[in-house]
Image (spheres, grey):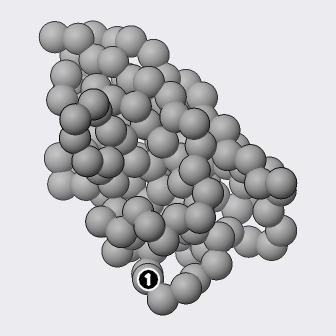
Amino acid sequence: QVQVVESGGGSVQAGGSLRLSCSTSGLYGDIYCMGWFRQVPGKEREGVASISSGGRTTYLDTVKGRFAISGINAKNTVYLQMNTLEPEDTGMYFCAVYPRYSGTWCSDTLTVPSVYNYWGQGTQVTVSS
């Protein structure tokens, strides 16, 4: 059974930092792509960052230069380092796994969450002004 578990959320003041972790189990072989998404009540889920097995990273424009995604197949764990946090970054953050390439490049998946097969339960990030 595949499990995806996020950790590291919390409450910080604007300008602060948080590091999210996402560990996976139950998958065999290299994972093609992993991503982080976030959602606030009443809004669509938004792709924040993705990383491919080759190490290519893609970011939502509003987090470029502030967030960094790393990891993937070394330990089946992905990290999201979030710096200079803003109140607009508040939301539930979800980790997602796209285990095998199925026609959509990892760099294009922030707007196509449906390609991800497995999702975690989410970890809350709250940034106060």
Q: Which residue is mark 1?
A: 104
Front-lying residue, 58 or 48: 48
Q: Is residue 22 visible in this depiction of the protein?
A: no
Indicate the position of residue 59 as horizontal and vertical percent values: 31, 57
The structure residue drawn at horizontal position 50% and vertical position 28%, both measured from the top left corner, is 123
Determine whether, in the image, residue 57 is placed left or right of residue 95. Answer: left
In the picture, measured across the screen, residue 96 lies left or right of residue 38, that is right
Q: Residue furthest front?
A: 42
Tell me residue 17's x, y (percent). 37, 23
Image side of residue 84 versus residue 70, left or right = left
**Residue 19, position in %: x, y?**
49, 30
Q: Amino acid at mark 1?
A: Thr
Snapshot quadrant of residue 127: top left
- Up the image or down, 53 lies above or below 38; here it is below
Question: Which residue is at a point 74% across and 47% down the rendered structure image?
Answer: 3
Front residue of 119 and 51:
119
Residue 11 visible in the picture: yes
Quadrant containing the C terminus is: top left
Give the vertical position of 124 relative to 66 (above or below): above
Label 1: which secondary element? loop
Q: Residue furthest bottom?
A: 103
Residue drawn at 79 percent across, 62 percent down: 27
